[in-house]
Amino acid sequence: MNLHRLRHTYASFMISKGVNFKIIQEQLGHTDIKQTLNTYSHLSDEDRTKASDLFDEIL
């Protein structure tokens, strides 16, 4: 695994665990939150399922 891929994995894992986006941005050294969100964050199937389950609870 190279450094670039590790950064993607790290950001995605932190987002999945509910870490604040601003913290992730700072840790990755980005000046713009858009770079963190658009480039370094990826949703897993588990994240999508959790979101759907939360919405089901509202209904």
Image (cartoon, helix red, strand yellow):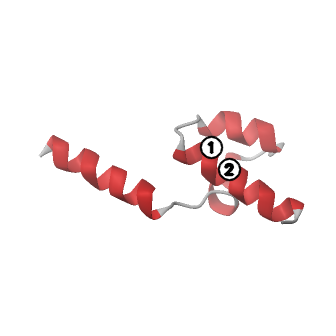
Question: Residue 9 location in percent, x, y?
Answer: 70, 57
Residue at left 54%, top 40%? Answer: 17
- Residue at 74 percent of width and 47 percent of height: 32
Residue type at mark 1 is Met
Left or right? Give the position of 38 relative to 25.
Answer: left
Q: Which residue is mark 2?
A: 11
- Quadrant (top left/top right/bottom left/bottom right) for the N terminus: bottom right
Q: Amino acid at mark 2?
A: Ala
In the rendered image, the vertical position of residue 52 relative to residue 30, given as above or below: below
Q: Which residue is mark 1?
A: 14
Of residues 1 and 4, the one nearer the viewer is 1
Q: Secondary structure at mark 2?
A: helix
Label annotation for residue 38: none
Disc 2 packing (10 Å; few <14; some 14–19; many ≥20):
many
The residue positioned farthest toward the left in the image shown: 59
Q: Nearer the viewer, residue 26 or 5?
A: 5
Q: Secondary structure at mark 1?
A: helix
Residue 43 in the image: x percent, y percent? 52, 60
Answer left or right for 12 relative to 44: right
Which quadrant of the structure image shows residue 35?
Answer: bottom right
> Residue 41 falls in which quadrant of the image?
bottom right
List x then y, in percent, for residue 45: 44, 64
Residue 46 sits in which quadrant?
A: bottom left
Looking at the image, residue 20 sits to the left or right of residue 50; the answer is right
Residue drawn at the location 44% of the way across and 54% of the way down: 47
Coordinates of residue 12 in the picture (x, y in percent): 62, 53
> Contact (CB < 8 A) between labels 1 and 2?
yes
Q: CA distance from mark 1 to mark 2?
A: 5 Å
Residue depicted at x 68% and y 50%: 11
